[in-house]
Image: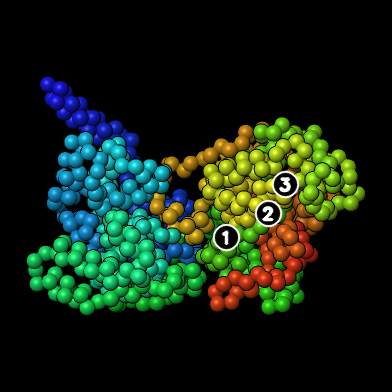
Amino acid sequence: MNDWIKAIRLIGGVFLALILFHALWPSKMELEPNTHFISSVRDEDHHLLALFGENTILDHRLTQEELAALDAKGTLNKYPIVPVLSYDELPENYIYFLTKVENKHFFDFGKDNLFGLSFSGIARLLKGQASGGSNIPQQLLKNAIHKKDGLGTIYLSRKYGEQLGAFQMMKSTPPEEVLIAYTNYSGNFWYERDFSGLILASYTIFGRPPHELNDLEMLLTVKTLKGGRELKALCDDRFANKARIKQRILDYYELISDPTETDRKRLSDMRRMELGFAQHNKLRNTDVLTLFLNQQRGAETSRFAVQYVSSITKERQDKLLEAVDQFSKKFRSQLTVKDHELQLSVIAIDIESGAIEATLGNRNNTGVMANLTNYGKGFQCGSVLKPLVFLELFEHFGFDGDTRLFNGNLEEYDYNPGNVKATLLNQEVPVRDVLKYSLNKAAVNYRVFANPAKVAQRVEKNFEKIGVSASPGYPWGASYILGTKTLTPWEVAQAYQMLLNDGEAIPLSPWKYIIDPHLQDTIYDNASQKRKKLYSTATANRIQNLLPAAFEKGGTCHRLLQWLPEDRTYYGKTGTTGKAKDGWTVLSDGKKLLVVWAGYMKIEDGKIIRKGTPSIPSKSGAGSAGVLAAMAYSKLYN
């Protein structure tokens, strides 16, 4: 009797899950790295082959008229990021091996595919077992949702979710589109080694595009999706274990192949093939993706893939380039110094929505890919970090507008930095003046009231919540507030978006997806954009209200007013790193935000050389990055 009760409960639970699932799950699922992303694949004549966008799933049926209408609205913009494959571009041997290994009946009905359901999987669930493999749509959901949220443990509720999600997805989406999504975004080839997607895996492991992989290499690539511990251990040292890996793959294909003349011939041919592993990760060379976009892919035509940031309009981008031209004319004699080029990075965002509205990769290449491929680890951020540290001090350590800090050396401490405002030396100054004049001595002397390591730790924990990278341990002392932390322009923009948005962070659109392809593993339902409240509105507003002082006479941003529209309230902070190698400026009117970095660099053999870097113009963040920030704001938002 107990067994019958258990069975009834289990079946009832399944039906209840189905009802709830269909009530709560979106009627149409979208492959969407972010709401502001539109990705497309075009041929050499710029004809659309596939489009992945906010209002469509991998829609490769758009007409040229529909595409032109999107382009007229500023929806499509040409800034290359990580390449993707359209269905027509998928290599034949990839589709063959993937479906043979993962899902034999993927394109039709069979025991492992009934609208994404697997009979063997259902049987295991009815027995209360969570173990066992998943088919292609289930793996797409697992990789995109559960792994994204850190729910990697196998348990019954997750398996139910995969089965139900796959059923819903396959009901509304053609299998070809699911396969493209799986291939480009959620295929964790080669055990998630710094990439997702077939193109990145192929270049990273073999140094070649997918179409150039032989059958042995392609089957190995596909097999790593479900390789198990033994194969993973062999692949960890693929050069030493090349022969063993080859034999294992041959044995595996012999096991799964059909007793047909075609499969027997394929196996015979594979025995004569070799695994041509690349000696190093060629994706580290930033030219390889550019070359990929221009070379022959497939037998008939040259194709390339681009992703678009739909919130960036051509009009705004043109205005930003006008500002860069204006800046270049002003600093024409300083654009090249001692074989080092002055490079610039700009990101302009709408604070309330988090949409990126304009961006500059560097002065000579406005492609977004150039920006964070080359600048992926960022630079020391200098004093732009000060308001973010004071935000923490105001929130949790009892600081307020009346708090005064000593602007001088404290003999009981070994570390006492230099200063820039002699008239205030050895005086007690309010936090407002610390930010207005960027007083280093006063800034570090918050240590009298709070432990710098504990303050930095709390700041870093909040940074981690919004995707801002952690600093190494050494800056977590008194110097942390001076910006020894390394940040990218995207990360600075994300942090200040939070500060200027009442302490609530909204994930910014696209830049992170360039340098961390794992972040592409997302199925976005167009309603789940997570907002994170990190600080109270009152505290965020107190810090924000201190920032206009920088534009007063004597303030670090005062010189920028000559390029800015009049009769507006501006919020700003500048930063300059040691020996004036890097200059930063954060500029906002409360609604729009610009973050600008400036610095010299030399590029040799695709690598950034910063040894012997000259000082930035004016040897200050305001006199370099700040000038461009003001010019760009005036062009974009006047």
Tell me residue 516's x, y (percent).
47, 57
Task: Identify the image quadrant of residue 151.
Answer: top left
Q: Which mark is residue 478?
A: 3
At a point 58% along the width and 38% down the height, the residue shown is 534
Of the numbered discs 3 and 1, the one sitting upstream in the chain is 1
Tell me residue 436's x, y (percent).
79, 47
Three-letter amino acid code at disc 3?
Answer: Ala
408 to 9, vertically: above or below: below
Which residue was labeled with disc 1? 377
Q: Is residue 45 visible?
A: no
Which one is in front, 448 or 147? Answer: 448
Which one is in front, 314 or 296? Answer: 296
At a point 65% along the width and 65% down the height, the residue shown is 344
Task: Identify the image quadrant of residue 270.
Answer: bottom left
399 to 253, vertically: above or below: above
350 with respect to 416 (left or right): left
Question: Which of labels 2 and 3 is toward the front?
Answer: 3
Q: Which mark is residue 566?
A: none
Element under disc 3: helix
Of the numbered discs 2 and 3, the one sitting upstream in the chain is 3
Q: Which mark is residue 484?
A: 2
